[in-house]
Each structure stands twice: as structure tokens, then as C-alpha cells.
Image (spheres, rainbow, N blue to C red):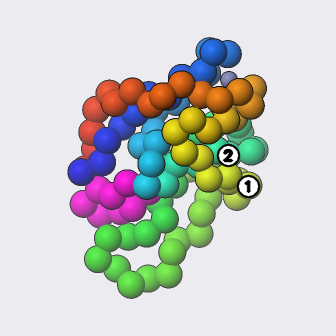
Amino acid sequence: MGVINRVGCDCGYSALVSAQRDAGTRSVTETVACRDCRELVDVMVAVVGSDDPTPLRRCPRCRGSRLAPWLPGGECPRCAEPMHEPVPVGSWD
Ligand SMILES: [Zn+2]
Ligand SMILES: [Zn+2]
């Protein structure tokens, strides 16, 4: 089961993401910053129980492929300042 975190920034931007490499019952996700729509998003990087090659990494919002890995303490995609610590708000499976 994965965890959903709210990550905020002083500029007012916030996002709901797993904020880490995470695995649900069916998929493995990573949090990335999309340089096209300037959002933090979770992208699926593998399917649990499948030997298929890693799916093409695409932003689920804009379909862009200019994605930068993002970890807690990373830069805000809007203002490039370090973001606040992730706060757990729920879970997914
Ligand atoms: Zn995007
Ligand atoms: Zn910001």
C-alpha cells in the first residue's frame, strides 16, 4: 500500500504525491517534477508482477516527457525554492 503526502511550498503551491518510490498492489510509482506543466506528479515506472519493460515515463497531466526526479526536500516546480517536508494525508492501494 502506498502513502499520499501533501507537499507544500512558501509560494503557495502544493501537490498530493507519494513523495518517494512507492508500490501499490499493481504498480510502482515515483514522484517527478514535470518541466512542462510545472507540477509534481507520480508516474508509474513498473507494473507489479510483470516483466514488461518499464512503461514510457509520461506526465499524467500534460503527457510531457521532460520529467526530473524529485525527492523530499527537492525544489518547487513553480519557484525553485526547497519545498516543505511531506505530510502524510492518506493512502492508496
Ligand atoms: Zn506535465
Ligand atoms: Zn514554490
Q: Where is residue 74 in the image (x, y as percent from the top left)?
A: 62, 38
Quarter location, residue 24: bottom left
Does dot 2 land on a helix, a strand or a loop? strand
Q: Position of residue 88 (x, y in %)?
A: 34, 30
Q: How crowded is mark 2: few (under 14 residues within 10 Å), some or many (20 or more)?
A: many
Quarter location, residue 82: top right
Does dot 1 land on a helix, a strand or a loop? loop
Q: Is residue 28 left or right of residue 54?
A: left
Q: Residues within 10 Å of mark 1 (few under 14, many from 20)?
A: some
Q: Is mark 2 within 8 Å of ligand 1?
A: yes
Residue type pointed to by label 2: Cys
- Count of numbered badges drawn on the protein: 2
Q: Does the residue labelled 1 lie within 8 Å of ligand 1?
A: yes
Can you see residue 39? yes
Can you see residue 61? no
Residue 66: numbered disc: 1
Q: Is residue 71 magenta?
A: no
**Picture residue at 28% right of the left edge, 44% below the top:** 92
Tell me which numbered mark, 2 or 1, is placed earlier along the sequence: 2
Residue type pointed to by label 1: Arg
**Picture residue at 46% right of the left edge, 42% below the top:** 19
Nearer to me, 27 or 21? 21
Q: In this view, does 13 lie to the left or right of 38?
A: left
Q: Determine contact: label 2, label 1, CB under 8 Å.
A: yes
Write down the region rendered in magenta: 22-29
Q: In this view, does 82 lie to the left or right of 14?
A: right
The residue tagged 2 is 34
Q: How far apart are marks 2 and 1 (CA)?
A: 6 Å
**Picture residue at 49% right of the left edge, 54% below the top:** 30
